[in-house]
Amino acid sequence: MNSYEGVVIANPASVPYVRHTKLGASWFIGTVFKSLLHQSGLKKEEVDGIAMSSFSLTPDSAISLTQHFRVSPRWIDQINLGGASGLVALRRAARAVQAGDAEVIACLSGDTATQTSFLSTAANFSSWTIDAAFPYGAAGPNAVFSLITQNYMECYGAKREDFARICLDQRYNSNHCHRALLGRTELTLEDYLSARHIAGPLHLFDCVMPCAGGEGFLVMTESRAKALPVRYARIMAADELHNAHQDDPIQFRGGWTEYAQQLYDMAGVGPSEIDCVQTYDDYPVISMIQMEDLLLCHKGDAPRFVQDTDMRFDGSGKAKKKLPHNTSGGQLSCGQAGTAAGYLGVTEALRQVTNTAGRNQVTGARTCLISGYGMVNYDRGLCSAAAILASGN
């Protein structure tokens, strides 16, 4: 891994999530862009790079939106890697800034949601989905994660009560975050355990809720950030690996296993020195796998780890061990706004380490670990990415 010295991330922007809307993906992406300009004080012409992620933007694309937004970037990328999109955008943008290809890059994501849009996205996710899964009655991601969850439970003895610990603490966090779509509702263990059955071991509150929304941030030189001025975070380490462990019959680990230690070494911190964690959480089992693969606990120990750890942002839980996790509520309480879900952990981490999270601020947060996961086919997610951010000013 090469250092990201001299490059920073700044100005997290979020467009409030809604369950359904008639507004298109371009509206959400454009609103994120407008917010980034307003927060930073930058003029549109000063943003010379664009990284964009969206599933529902089709038939438009990143390049067609440059005309719509009236911008002329020197550098552009379109990154549709689901839950890994935000971290991959961060890495590519940072390297472009280091190379001098651009000075300020806006990383933008947004997706719309109509009554039937998620069904269409799932049915046309890939040629494998179209030809070999959906015609035979495949139930979309719920079926895949039912398989992964059942396998994990059989291998490591996890129980529904263990998955509940993640969901309950995240719902508590969302109750203090105004952006969370489900933040106005409480969730009890009884609610979780008695929720209606969905697929295999999955019940209602194990499954992420599709919605519409947008997320974004700026990547720029540190000198430019100081001149604006804006609050920013340093990229201490970041990496990605895709289609790892191909021979595993059912996914129980991801590509993080291959670079987690190097990530900490590069950042100069250990797992116990991380102040908060943002994992990709479309289903609780995936958060557990990330916790293990990113060395927060040993493989198979995540069920005990979450029972022994208070994951609330304010440390108000009963467990003695404290590690704030998905401090905005994560997708399980905020909703899954398409590719914007892959940016959610990045924007929340940035708010935490710049002390701008508001009511759900982790006291004294200086470092945050972010993990991304996405692009699920059959029995696994193909993309894994991670980064460690630290307070910059």
Image (cartoon, grey):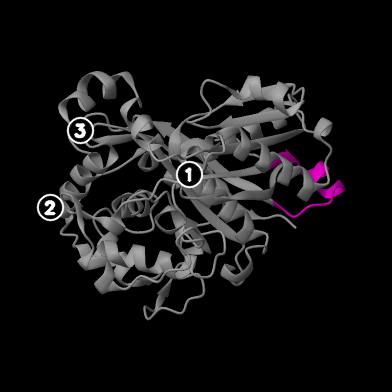
Determine the secondary structure under disc 3.
loop
Residue lying at 67% horizontally and 29% vertically, measured from the top left:
50
**Which mark's residue is nearer the viewer, 2 or 1?**
1
Is residue 220 on the magenta stretch?
A: yes
Which residue is labeled 2 in the image? 154
**For the residue marked with disc 2, what is the amino acid?**
Glu
Which residue is labeled 1 in the image? 337
Whole-number angstrom distance, CA of label 2 to CA of label 1: 31 Å
Count residues near mark 2 (Cα–Cα under 10 Å), then give few for <14, some for 14-19, many for 20+.
Answer: few
Residue lying at 33% horizontally and 40% vertically, measured from the top left:
254
251 vs 216, nearest the viewer: 216
Which residue is labeled 3 in the image? 138
Determine the secondary structure under disc 2.
helix
Q: Work out whether mark 2 precedes mark 1 in sequence or the reverse, and give the earlier one.
A: 2
Count residues near mark 1 (Cα–Cα under 10 Å), then give few for <14, some for 14-19, many for 20+.
Answer: many
Q: Work out whether mark 3 precedes mark 1 in sequence or the reverse, and give the earlier one.
A: 3
* Residue 35 drawn above or below residue 168: above
- Residue 36 location, quadrant: top right
* Residue 251 drawn above or below residue 283: above
Determine the secondary structure under disc 1.
loop
147 vs 124, nearest the viewer: 124
Instruction: Give the magenta range.
Output: 218-232
